[in-house]
Amino acid sequence: MNGTLARKLRFTDYFALAFGTMVGVGWLVVMDDWLGRGGPLGAILAFAIGGVLLLPVGYVYGQWVQRLPDAAGEAAYAAQVFPPYVSYFTGWIMLLAYFIVCPWEAVAVGKLAAYLFPSLNSFELYHVAGHPVFLPRLLLGLGLTFFITILNYRGVRASATFQNWSAGTVLVLFLVIVGASAAHGSPAHFHPAFSSTPFISILLTLQIVPYFMTGFESVPKVAEEAHPEFRSRGFSSAIFLAVIVGAGFYVLVTAAVAYVSPWQGLLGKPFATAVAFEQGTGVPWLVRIVMASAMVALFEVFNGNFVAASRLLFAFGRRGTIPARFGEVHERFLTPSVAILGIALATIIGLLLGDAILVPVTEVGSMAAASGWFMACLSFWLVEKNSSKRLITSLGIVVALLLVLMKLLPFFPGHFSMAEWLALAIWLAIGLMLRRG
């Protein structure tokens, strides 16, 4: 049936959703990639600069969500000033930024568990792009996907409570990790501070920052589900806090890893963060703390992106731009049940591709997020008449546009490869097939 979504979310829920959608297991799974791109100082500066640069973008989202609390997010904002097909593909690209994280995390849970229990790397089923797919790891990914699906299907309150618990746990364990690094590390491990020249080092890491910082703008996707007593200014506060805490998390965890162990010895190592603490401290329980916090972070980022993706898909169905069934609300649970099942099915299809999706997904997701930010800022600039608000919005436009161009233009280091162009083309083709006139 069609209807209204349950209204149960408060400030803590919005912050936990935004932070949890942003901070997953990238700091464990691809830390060697970050250090290889920028060196310790290059990666630290890239995330710090990225956090500051995203504040104007966060400001625009805070303004939009107060004016237009619509689950369609960027698609609804673009629809205020652009033709329907521009609005649709703005939202469709943004849906990619959220959805793509779901199979990423479903694959990562098996990879993470196999580090602790190597026997999971058995019963090889097939290969994708040279990467083996193992049955036990596939079953773990399927199990997690079913858990997140049921959690979301049965009500937003259950999903939000889970998100609050997991985000709080991650932050507490993170403080333990940083403290252990400070006690066991050495500044000498930072040398050399950059992987290349300072500019190139920062630029190469800055290109992937949007993927790992995507999440603060998930708040508008569940704005319609705010508790009746929730004040609309709280949306902006939750967004700003998530950007600052998220960027701070990435800065400090990169510093902690590079401080505790020589970073060049971590390149090419799976789970470089755990390896760094194993080598640098020789304390086994610390490695377990790192892995435990990563596992909880994986659950929260999967859940957060699943919530955002399902709400965006639901909004498309409700607006009639894709089959209207996606816009149905469950009669008992008041959740977008068909959209939730749609995201679950697509996640399982992505999961079947295995480890081969991990790196290209980071690159495509990064560009997709920045594209959504750009359109949200441009739309706001066109509807807003206040000159000071327009000035802040202009900064957001410039930041988002640069982040998009860094991935698309061939003269920037780290631009799209053929595999990434192909992934983007397939996604746009699916959007074209689903779109109704």
Image: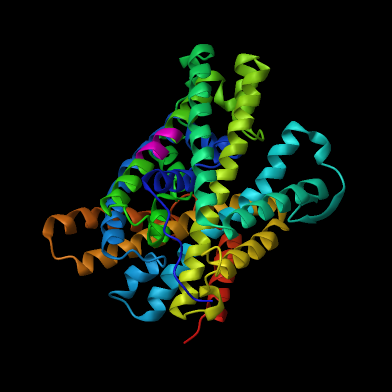
Q: Quadrant of residue 393?
A: bottom left
Q: The magenta stretch spans which residues?
A: 244-249
Q: Nearer the viewer, residue 164 or 246?
A: 164
User: Percent position (x, y) of residue 28?
Assistant: 59, 35
Q: For the point 60% across and 21% down, which residue is it? A: 277
Q: Which residue reaches farthest bottom?
A: 437
Q: Nearer the viewer, residue 141 or 201?
A: 141
Q: For the point 65% across and 19% down, which residue is it? A: 285
User: Percent position (x, y) of residue 119?
Assistant: 83, 36
Q: Nearer the viewer, residue 410 or 115?
A: 115
Q: For the point 12% across and 61% down, which residue is it? A: 386
Q: Which residue reaches farthest left?
A: 387
In this picture, residue 25 sits left or right of residue 196:
right
Work out whether 433 lies above or below 239. Answer: below
The kind of secondary structure the magenta stretch mainly shows is: helix
Q: Is any atom of residue 405 visible in this view?
A: no
Q: Is any atom of residue 381 visible in this view?
A: yes
In this picture, residue 237 sits left or right of residue 174:
left
How many numbered circles are shown? 0
Q: Quadrant of residue 60?
A: bottom left
Q: For the point 31% across and 56% down, which residue is it? A: 61
Q: Nearer the viewer, residue 36 or 279?
A: 279
Queried whether the magenta region covers residue 263, the answer comes back as no
Q: Which residue reaches farthest right?
A: 123
Work out whether 196 lies above or below 2. Answer: above
**Quadrant of the frame with the N terminus:** bottom right
